[in-house]
Image (spheres, rainbow, N blue to C red):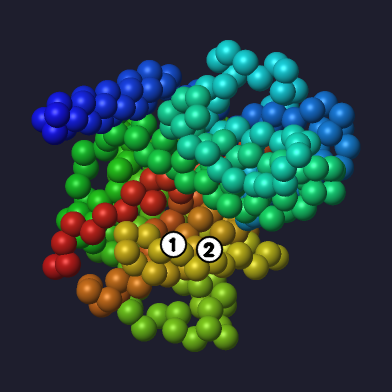
C-alpha cells in the first residue's frame, strides 16, 4: 500500500507539472506596437472622469521632448469586445466597476510576454483612487517589459564592432544597422539613419570626482555636455559663427537616480540644440559611478529628426543603453 501511494503521488505531481508546462507552451506570442496599450474599459467610463484619469497617467507627455508625445498610445475597447487576438496585446489595462476594490498586475495571462494591469472599484471614485495609487507600478511594469522585448529583438542582428570594449571595457547590444561614425581617445559616436534624421549614441568618461557637489549638479552636467559638444560634435558651417551641440539653454534638464549594470548614477533627460544654428532634439544621458575603473562612465543617446515624432527612437536608444555590460575592469 505504501508503495502504491508513493507511485500515485509521483504520478499526480508529474501530471500537474506537465499540465502547467503545456499551458505555458501554448501561450501565443504577444503582439502590439512599441509603447502601445489596450485599455479595456466600459465606453461610458472611458468618456468620463475614469477615462480622463487613465489618460492623465498613461498618456502623460514624456519629459524632455521637444513636442508633447504620450507615454503610451492607447486603444480603448469595451469589455464585451475583448476577445480573440485582442487578448494577445503585450500591455493591457483592465478597468471595471466590481464588488471588489483592488489594483494589481498579472503576467502572461493570454500571451507572452504580457502584463495586464487590473483596476477595480465599487464606484467611479474608488476606481479613480485605485488608478492613481497603482498607475506608477503598472507603467513601470509595462515599460520594463517593452525594454526587455526590444532588447531581445536586437539580438537578431547585432553590431559586431568592438570599439566600446577596446576603449572603455564595456559592451552594448546595438543593432547592426548602427555603425561607428567617429572615435577619439576618449569618445565614440555610433549612429544610424532614421526617417528625416539620425539616432545617435555617444560614450565617453569623466574623472571619478566629477559631479560630487549636489548643489551644482545640474550646472556641472550642462557644462560637461556643452564641452563635449564643442570638442566632438560640430554643427553645420556658418560663415563667421561657431556651431556645435550644446544643452538647450532655455530648459533645465530633468535628473533622476538610476542603476544600470550594478552601477549607480543619474539619468538626465532634456533638449539639445546647435549653437548659432536652428537644429535641436531630445537627449538621454546616463552618468554612472564606475569606481572599479576610477571614472564616471557617460552613455548618451540623442535624436535628430525635425518635424517628426521621436518617442520610439528615443525608446530604442534607452533600451540599447540599458544593455550595458562591463567586460573588464582593466583599461
Split into 4 quadrants, where in the image is the C terminus?
bottom left
Q: In this view, does 96 lie to the left or right of 37?
A: right
- The residue that label 2 is drawn on is 268
Most extreme residue toward the top is 84
Split into 4 quadrants, where in the image is the N terminus?
top left
Q: How far apart are marks 2 and 1 (CA)?
A: 6 Å
User: Which numbered tag is attached to residue 286?
Assistant: 1
Nearer the observer, 241 or 183: 183
Compared with 80, 282 (above or below) is below
Compared with 79, 226 (above or below) is below
User: Which numbered tag is attached to residue 246?
Assistant: none
Q: How crowded is mark 1: few (under 14 residues within 10 Å), some or many (20 or more)?
A: many
Helix, strand or loop at label 1? It is strand
Compared with 49, 166 (above or below) is below
Nearer the observer, 199 or 132: 132
Most extreme residue toward the left is 3
Regarding residue 10, the answer to whether it shows in the image is no
Name the residue at 50% across, 24% down: 110
Q: Where is residue 223 in the image (x, y as percent from the top left)?
A: 51, 74
Q: Position of residue 284 (x, y in %)?
A: 51, 55
Q: In this view, does 60 lie to the left or right of 17?
A: right
Name the residue at 49% across, 86% down: 213
Amino acid at each position: 500500500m505504501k508503495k502504491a501511494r508513493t507511485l500515485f503521488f509521483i504520478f499526480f505531481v508529474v501530471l500537474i507539472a506537465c499540465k502547467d508546462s503545456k499551458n505555458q507552451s501554448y501561450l501565443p506570442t504577444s503582439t502590439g506596437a512599441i509603447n502601445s496599450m489596450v485599455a479595456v474599459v466600459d465606453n461610458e467610463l472611458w468618456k468620463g472622469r475614469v477615462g480622463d484619469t487613465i489618460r492623465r497617467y498613461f498618456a502623460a507627455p514624456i519629459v524632455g521632448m521637444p513636442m508633447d508625445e504620450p507615454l503610451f498610445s492607447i486603444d480603448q475597447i469595451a469589455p464585451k469586445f475583448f476577445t480573440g487576438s485582442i487578448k494577445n496585446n503585450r500591455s493591457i489595462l483592465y478597468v471595471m466597476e466590481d464588488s471588489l476594490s483592488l489594483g494589481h498586475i498579472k503576467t502572461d495571462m493570454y500571451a507572452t510576454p504580457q502584463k495586464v494591469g487590473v483596476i477595480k472599484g465599487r464606484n467611479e471614485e474608488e476606481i479613480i483612487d485605485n488608478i492613481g495609487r497603482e498607475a506608477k507600478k503598472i507603467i513601470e511594469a509595462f515599460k520594463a517589459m517593452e525594454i526587455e522585448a526590444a532588447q531581445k529583438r536586437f539580438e537578431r542582428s547585432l553590431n559586431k564592432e568592438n570599439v566600446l570594449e577596446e576603449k572603455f571595457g564595456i559592451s552594448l547590444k546595438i543593432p547592426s544597422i548602427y555603425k561607428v561614425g567617429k572615435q577619439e581617445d576618449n569618445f565614440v559616436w555610433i549612429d544610424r539613419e532614421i526617417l528625416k534624421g539620425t539616432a545617435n549614441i555617444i560614450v565617453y568618461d569623466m574623472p571619478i570626482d566629477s559631479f560630487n557637489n549636489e548643489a551644482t549638479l545640474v550646472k556641472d552636467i550642462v557644462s560637461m555636455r556643452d564641452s563635449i559638444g564643442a570638442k566632438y560634435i560640430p554643427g553645420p558651417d556658418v560663415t563667421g559663427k561657431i556651431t556645435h551641440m550644446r544643452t538647450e539653454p532655455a530648459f533645465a534638464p530633468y535628473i533622476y537616480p538610476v542603476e544600470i549594470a550594478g552601477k549607480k548614477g543619474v539619468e538626465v533627460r532634456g533638449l539639445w540644440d546647435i549653437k548659432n544654428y536652428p537644429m535641436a532634439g531630445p537627449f538621454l544621458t546616463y552618468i554612472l559611478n564606475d569606481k572599479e575603473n576610477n571614472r564616471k562612465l557617460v552613455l548618451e543617446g540623442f535624436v535628430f529628426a525635425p518635424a517628426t515624432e521621436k518617442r520610439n527612437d528615443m525608446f530604442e536608444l534607452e533600451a540599447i543603453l540599458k544593455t550595458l555590460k562591463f567586460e573588464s575592469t582593466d583599461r
